[in-house]
Image (cartoon, rainbow, N blue to C red):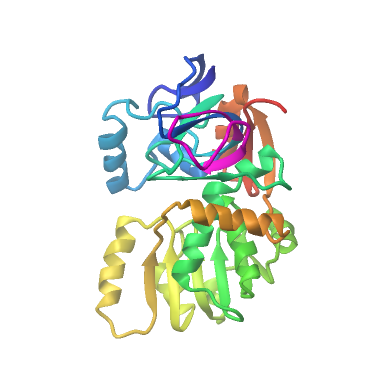
């Protein structure tokens, strides 16, 4: 089978196309023929180790100190078809069309085949939405599940005002649609060229961060979801209503220190560091919303597996709208 191998930490050019042996599922696993996967900012950060210092240390300790060893194939999203099942598998059958999130600690979707547990300890696996292509379905799992987890942590309610900073990417585009489904009033912040797209998927208000600073408007929000983690901590707190919640999706060490300091103050406002637990039931919940026409994937570009390096370079340039999809096997 063809796969993109992660040979060392560094630029996109460290990724190489190789032929590997097709895996065989264990008793509790399914063998999935992958038709589509994605390239996310998380994939690029893993590859390059351009991460906060503390997380970089953890990744080297887990993946490999000098070069990747435990994980040698990147990619966390997939859509495909089950080709074989282990003898103890009950929930799936051969021929089932599925989509899945493997999680950071497994990865492995830049490949024509992968074996996944029927009930993953980390990750989620479910039947693919009937009204999506494989490319559209591959874009859902990680971005959709992270957005759902973050909105639940923020306890977003009907008629509340939520601001999403970094709204035009993988997580943000799903967060807008989900917040809209929860009947919240959504303000989306991103760059100029993404604003029309943000409006088209349900943002009530848009702010171009290259022209305006949302913390300087004098407007306040019940919740702020900071996907890109580049806002001023104190200014963001100042843009919250009383009892407001500020969720930082990718906290840095400085955020952790500031949170400790903030917790010592008497305030009804709350700072949250985003945590994600990938669950099968949540992926099925997203599937139901998709089939009901409440949620869709935003796909910027699609590349064949052989052009994964080019896809990584495009994502690292920071200009993508929504998702970048890799077509592993054409259908």
Q: Is residue 111 visible?
A: no
Q: Position of residue 217 (x, y in %)?
A: 58, 78
96 magenta-colored: yes
Q: Is residue 84 left or right of residue 130?
A: left
Instruction: Write down the quadrant of residue 242 in the picture.
Output: bottom left
Q: Residue at x 72, y 56 (%)?
A: 197
Q: Residue at x 39, y 80 (%)?
A: 269
Camera-side residue of 46 and 139 = 139
271 magenta-colored: no
Camera-side residue of 95 and 71 = 95
Image quadrant in which the C terminus is located: top right
Residue 87 higher or lower than 130, as above or below? above
For the record, the magenta segment spans: 80-100
Q: Is residue 299 visible?
A: yes
Q: Position of residue 92 (x, y in %)?
A: 54, 39
Image quadrant in which the N terminus is located: top right
């Amino acid at each position: 089978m063809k796969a993109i191998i992660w040979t060392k930490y560094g630029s996109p050019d460290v990724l190489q196309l190789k032929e590997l042996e097709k895996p065989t599922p264990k008793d509790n696993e399914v063998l999935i023929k992958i038709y589509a996967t994605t390239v996310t900012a998380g994939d690029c950060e893993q590859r390059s180790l351009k991460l906060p210092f503390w997380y970089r240390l953890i990744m080297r300790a887990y993946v490999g100190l000098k070069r990747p060893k435990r994980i040698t194939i990147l990619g966390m999203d997939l859509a495909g078809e089950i080709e074989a099942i282990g003898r103890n598998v009950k929930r799936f059958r051969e021929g089932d069309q599925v989509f899945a999130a493997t999680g950071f600690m497994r990865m492995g979707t830049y490949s024509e085949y992968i074996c996944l547990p029927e009930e993953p300890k980390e990750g989620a696996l479910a039947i693919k939405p009937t009204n999506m292509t494989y490319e559209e379905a591959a874009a859902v799992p990680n971005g959709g599940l992270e957005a759902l987890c973050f909105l639940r942590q923020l306890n977003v309610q009907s008629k509340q005002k939520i601001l999403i900073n970094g709204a035009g990417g993988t997580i943000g585009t799903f967060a807008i649609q989900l917040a809209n489904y929860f009947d919240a009033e959504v303000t989306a912040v991103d760059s100029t060229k993404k604003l029309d797209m943000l409006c088209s998927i349900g943002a009530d208000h848009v702010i171009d961060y290259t022209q305006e600073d949302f913390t300087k408007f004098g407007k306040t929000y019940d919740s702020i979801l900071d996907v890109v983690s580049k806002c001023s901590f104190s200014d963001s707190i100042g843009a919250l209503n009383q009892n407001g919640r500020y969720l930082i999706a990718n906290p840095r060490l400085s955020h952790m220190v500031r949170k400790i300091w903030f917790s010592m103050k008497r305030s009804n406002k709350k700072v949250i560091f985003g945590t994600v637990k990938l669950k099968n039931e949540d992926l099925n919940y997203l599937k139901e919303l998709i089939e009901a026409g409440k949620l869709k994937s935003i796909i910027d570009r699609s590349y064949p597996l052989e052009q994964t390096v080019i896809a990584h370079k495009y994502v690292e340039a920071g200009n993508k709208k929504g998702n970048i999809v890799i077509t592993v096997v054409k259908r």
